[in-house]
């Protein structure tokens, strides 16, 4: 049985089962089951799945979208802009501390979802009553984070590619400043912040690789004894896979990571760990 990934407005994606064995192709629109009705989206991927692995409550793909259905998208987008304008007026009227981000009509018009950001919880019961009275349909106000806001609007990152959150990222993992420090990145906010204003998600992508490469290597500023003298660790260059050392006279020495680890491992105890203390055997010492 096929599992179909369908994309809706603003990179919202969901999975559906092709229980009716429809002939589906990526790049085509289809109509699917939705909350109390029907919705329409673009097929972006199709995969085979074992029927035993499909959740019993997974919604279905109902049918192919017709040309008339697709043509109606432009009208829907116009209605969404008007709904956003009306909601903004009501938010101002009720003096609610919230920022409206986007609005999305369900294909059949049975629900309108308003997305907003806020620093805290909002009592929007009166706002929902007003909107329901105006639009005569079900109203859903959904609070999202700033990363979700960036995903909905999409854009380009400083790397020159589309935002990760708008392409392949499905869940947001915690990103900390320590991740940038562990990769010797500049801690300038403009250098490590994404379009959402938070730390870039990609700071976590290569963190494991950096940690593996620098395992058992002293931190910058440490003093070592090896390579025929005493040196200070100035920098660990991951891209060149080298350690930059300097002696008391200011002369620098660039050593490949593997060579450095081999030198530091001389005369170390079993298990390959360097003895970071007195070394009666004359091996390298990290101070």
Image (tube, grey):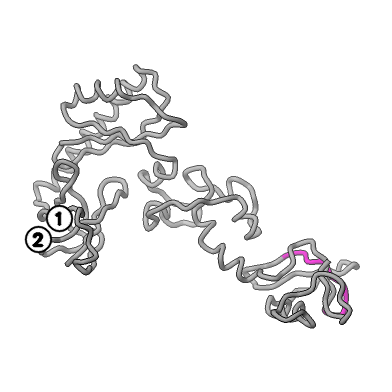
Which secondary structure lies at badge 1? strand
| Residue 286 picture location, percent across and down | 81, 69
Query: Does residue 231 belong to the magenta stretch?
Result: yes
| Residue 79 picture location, percent across and down | 20, 33
Which residue is more in the foreground, 99 or 137?
137
Quarter of the figure with the C terminus: bottom right
> What's the residue at 42%, 55% (across, down)?
164
- For this view, does 140 lie left or right of residue 72? right
- For this view, does 130 lie left or right of residue 63? right
- For this view, does 43 lie left or right of residue 244? left
The residue that label 2 is drawn on is 20
Q: Which residues are magenta?
A: 227-235
| Figure check: 231 above or below 12 | below
Which secondary structure lies at badge 2? loop
Which residue is more in the foreground, 173 or 270?
270
The residue that label 1 is drawn on is 61
Asked if marks 2 and 1 touch (Cβ < 8 Å), the reply is: yes
> What's the residue at 71%, 79% (across, down)?
272
Q: Alpha-carbon distance for marks 2 and 1? A: 8 Å
| Residue 1 picture location, percent across and down | 17, 67
> What's the residue at 32%, 21% (across, down)?
89
Give neighbour class at mark 2: few <14, some 14-19, many 20+ (Cα, 10 Å). few
Q: Where on the picture, by quarter, is residue 170?
A: bottom left
Q: Which mark is residue 177?
A: none
Mark 2 or mark 1: which comes first in sequence? 2
């Amino acid at each position: 049985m096929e599992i179909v990934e369908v994309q809706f407005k603003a990179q919202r994606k969901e999975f559906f089962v092709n229980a009716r064995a429809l002939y589906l192709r990526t790049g085509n629109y289809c109509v699917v089951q939705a909350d109390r009705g029907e919705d329409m989206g673009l097929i972006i991927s199709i995969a085979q799945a074992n029927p035993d692995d499909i959740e019993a409550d997974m919604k279905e793909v109902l049918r192919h979208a017709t040309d008339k259905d697709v043509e109606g998208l432009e009208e829907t987008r116009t209605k969404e802009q008007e709904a956003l304008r009306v909601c903004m007026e009501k938010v101002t009227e009720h003096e609610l501390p919230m920022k409206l981000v986007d609005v999305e009509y369900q294909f059949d018009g049975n629900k309108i979802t308003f997305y907003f950001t806020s620093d805290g919880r909002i009592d929007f019961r009166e706002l929902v009553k007003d909107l329901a009275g105006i639009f005569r349909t079900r109203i859903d106000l959904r609070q999202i984070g700033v990363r979700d806001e960036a995903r909905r609007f999409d854009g380009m990152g400083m790397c020159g590619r589309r935002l990760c959150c708008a392409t392949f990222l499905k869940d947001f993992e915690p990103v900390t400043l320590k991740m940038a420090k562990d990769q010797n990145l500049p801690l300038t906010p403009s250098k490590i912040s994404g379009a959402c204003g938070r730390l870039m998600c990609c700071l976590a992508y290569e963190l494991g690789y950096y940690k593996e490469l620098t395992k058992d290597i002293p931190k910058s500023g440490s003093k070592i004894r090896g390579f025929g003298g005493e040196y200070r660790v100035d920098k660990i260059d991951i891209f060149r896979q080298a350690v930059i050392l300097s002696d008391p006279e200011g002369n620098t020495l660039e050593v490949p990571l593997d060579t450095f680890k081999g030198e530091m491992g001389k005369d170390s105890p079993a298990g390959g760990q360097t003895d970071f203390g007195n070394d009666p055997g004359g091996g390298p010492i990290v101070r």
